[in-house]
Image: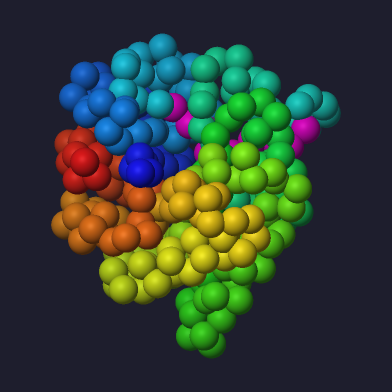
C-alpha cells in the first residue's frame, strides 16, 4: 500500500508573517503522517522558520536546489544546506523552472542524484505542454522525461521518488485535466517505471497529479487507482483549503 502524499507548492508567495500564520493554523490539525504525508514546499528564506514549527505531521520541502554541494553559484542553495536545517523534500524540475530558468533534463537528473546522496526526497515534476497534448505527444514527452531524469537512479532510490504529473496547460489556469486524462497519464508513468525498473518499483512509487487541484476536484482525483496524491499550487496557500485537501487523501 502506498501512503498518499499531498504537497503544497507555495511558489513565490507569502512573507514570513504570512507563512507563520499558515503554519500555526494547520500544524496541529493535520492527520497522522502514517496515514497521509503532508508537505509544504516553501520559498527558501522561510524554510528554517517553518521546520522549527512544523509539528508532528507536517514536513517541509524546498522548491529547488543546485546539484553541486557548494561552489561559486550566486543565489543558489545546496542539498547540504537544506539538510542542515531539517528540510526533507525538494521539488525538482517544476515546469516553471524548466521553462523560465532553462532547466534541462540533464541538470534535473543531477539534482535527483544529489538529493539521494543527502537523503532528501525528490518530488520530480514531469508533464506536457498544450501543443504537445494537441499533437498527441503526451506519452512521448513523459517517456523522454522519465528516461532522461532517472539516469543512474538505482531501483532502491527510484522507489522513493515522488513523481508529480503536471500537464503544463493545467497549471495555474483553472483548467484541470479530466480525471480520465490524469489517470491515463499516471497509469502510463507507472507502466514506464515498470519497464525502466521492475514491477516492485512501479508498485511502490508514488505518483501525484498537479494542475489546478482544488477542494472541489481532489476527491475524484484521489479516487483513481494510479493517483497517490497531489502537488498543489494556488489552493495550498489557504490554510483551510490545504487541510481539506490533505483530509481528502485519507
Ligand atoms: P496550481 O499549481 O495548483 O496553482 O495549478 C500546481 C503546480 O504548479 O505545482
Going by the image, does 110 lie left or right of 138? right
Residue 5, image x, y percentages: 36, 41
Going by the image, does 22 lie left or right of 10? left
Residue 137, image x, y percentages: 56, 81
Residue 148, quarter of picture: bottom right
- Evaluate whether residue 75 shows in this view: no
Task: Give the residue displayed 70% in from the left and 29% down from the top.
Answer: 117
Task: Give the residue displayed 71% in from the left and 39% down from the top.
Answer: 113
Task: Give the residue displayed 53% in from the left and 56% down from the top.
Answer: 199
Name the main secondary structure of what is drawn in magenta: loop
Viewer-nearest residue: 209 or 200: 200
Viewer-nearest residue: 154 or 117: 154
- 54 up-or-down from 163: above or below: above
- 84 up-or-down from 97: above or below: above
How was this image coloured? rainbow
Q: Quadrant of the C terminus?
A: top left
Residue 116, image x, y percentages: 65, 33
- 94 up-or-down from 141: above or below: above
Residue 41, quarter of picture: top left
Membership of 62 in magenta stretch? yes
Going by the image, does 176 lie left or right of 141? left
Magenta residues (range): 60-68
Residue 68, quarter of picture: top right
Membership of 196 in magenta stretch? no
- Evaluate whether residue 1 shows in this view: yes
Q: Quadrant of the N terminus?
A: top left
Viewer-nearest residue: 151 or 225: 225
Identity of the residue furthest to the bottom in this view: 135
Going by the image, does 40 lie left or right of 160? left
Amino acid at each position: 500500500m502506498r501512503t498518499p502524499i499531498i504537497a503544497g507548492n507555495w511558489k513565490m508567495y507569502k512573507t514570513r508573517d504570512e507563512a507563520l500564520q499558515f503554519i500555526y493554523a494547520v500544524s496541529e490539525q493535520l492527520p497522522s503522517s502514517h496515514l497521509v504525508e503532508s508537505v509544504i514546499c516553501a520559498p527558501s528564506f522561510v524554510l528554517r522558520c517553518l521546520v522549527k514549527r512544523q509539528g508532528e505531521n507536517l514536513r517541509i520541502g524546498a522548491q529547488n536546489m543546485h546539484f553541486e554541494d557548494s561552489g561559486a553559484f550566486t543565489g543558489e542553495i545546496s542539498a547540504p544546506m537544506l539538510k542542515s536545517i531539517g528540510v526533507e523534500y525538494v521539488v525538482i524540475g517544476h515546469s516553471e523552472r524548466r521553462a523560465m530558468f532553462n532547466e534541462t533534463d540533464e541538470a534535473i537528473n543531477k539534482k535527483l542524484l544529489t538529493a539521494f546522496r543527502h537523503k532528501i526526497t525528490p518530488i520530480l515534476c514531469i508533464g506536457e505542454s498544450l501543443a504537445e497534448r494537441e499533437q498527441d505527444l503526451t506519452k512521448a514527452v513523459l517517456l523522454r522525461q522519465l528516461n532522461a531524469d532517472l539516469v543512474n537512479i538505482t531501483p532502491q532510490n527510484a522507489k522513493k521518488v515522488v513523481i508529480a504529473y503536471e500537464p503544463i496547460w493545467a497549471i495555474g489556469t483553472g483548467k484541470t485535466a479530466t480525471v480520465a486524462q490524469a489517470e491515463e497519464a499516471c497509469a502510463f508513468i507507472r507502466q514506464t517505471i515498470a519497464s525502466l525498473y521492475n514491477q516492485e518499483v512501479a508498485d511502490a512509487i508514488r505518483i501525484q497529479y498537479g494542475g489546478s487541484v482544488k477542494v472541489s476536484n481532489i476527491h475524484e482525483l484521489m479516487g483513481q487507482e494510479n493517483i497517490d496524491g497531489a502537488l498543489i499550487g494556488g489552493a495550498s496557500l489557504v490554510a483551510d483549503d490545504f487541510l481539506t485537501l490533505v483530509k481528502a487523501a485519507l
